Amino acid sequence: MSLVRIVKSVAEKIRTPQPINISVDDCPVPRLNLDEITEVVFYKKDLMTTDLICVEIHSGENFTFYHEEWDGWRELIDQLEELSEFDMEWYLKVVKPAFEPCFYTAYKKQT
């Protein structure tokens, strides 16, 4: 199939009123290289009726985002807890007060 046909096919699907579902729930939990992690920041997003706990894992100038609704969340947190000087009390510092912004750095690599 030519590139033009592929683009036209995708464009046609986008124009249709059918919903497009994108899911990462089946993605495997990444094995983190703990030596490369420079910072771990937890925060919550106000979703009107609930809060969503999120984490950014920084490696130098790059970061990866995950949230607690992802199937691999617990395994990811278990890996982060292996970092020396990781604050195991991060959850208590992020969850309250409810429905208010809260950012907390649970780990920052000493340089």
Image (spheres, rainbow, N blue to C red):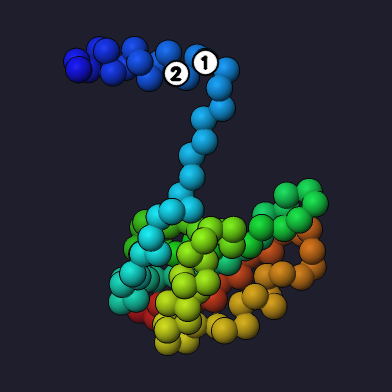
Q: Amino acid at mark 1?
A: Thr
Q: Residue at x 68, y 75 (%)?
A: 93
* Extreme-left residue of the structure: 2
SS for dot 1: loop
Q: Residue 36 appears in which quarter of the rendering? A: bottom left
In the rendered image, the vertical position of residue 18 relative to residue 4, given as above or below: below
> Which residue is depicted at the point 69% across and 78% down?
92
98 on left or right of 3:
right
**Amino acid on which disc 2 is placed:** Lys
Q: Nearer the viewer, residue 84 or 52?
A: 52
Give the residue displayed 65% in from the left and 75% down from the top: 91
Residue 97 at what x, y percent from top left?
79, 68
Q: Position of residue 73 (x, y in %)?
A: 52, 66
| Residue beneath disc 2 | 13
Q: CA distance from mark 1 to mark 2?
A: 5 Å
Quadrant where the image shows the N terminus: top left
Determine whether, in the image, residue 94 is placed left or right of residue 75. Answer: right
Horizontal and vertical percent position of residue 51: 72, 58
Please say whether residue 1 is visible from this viewpoint. Answer: yes
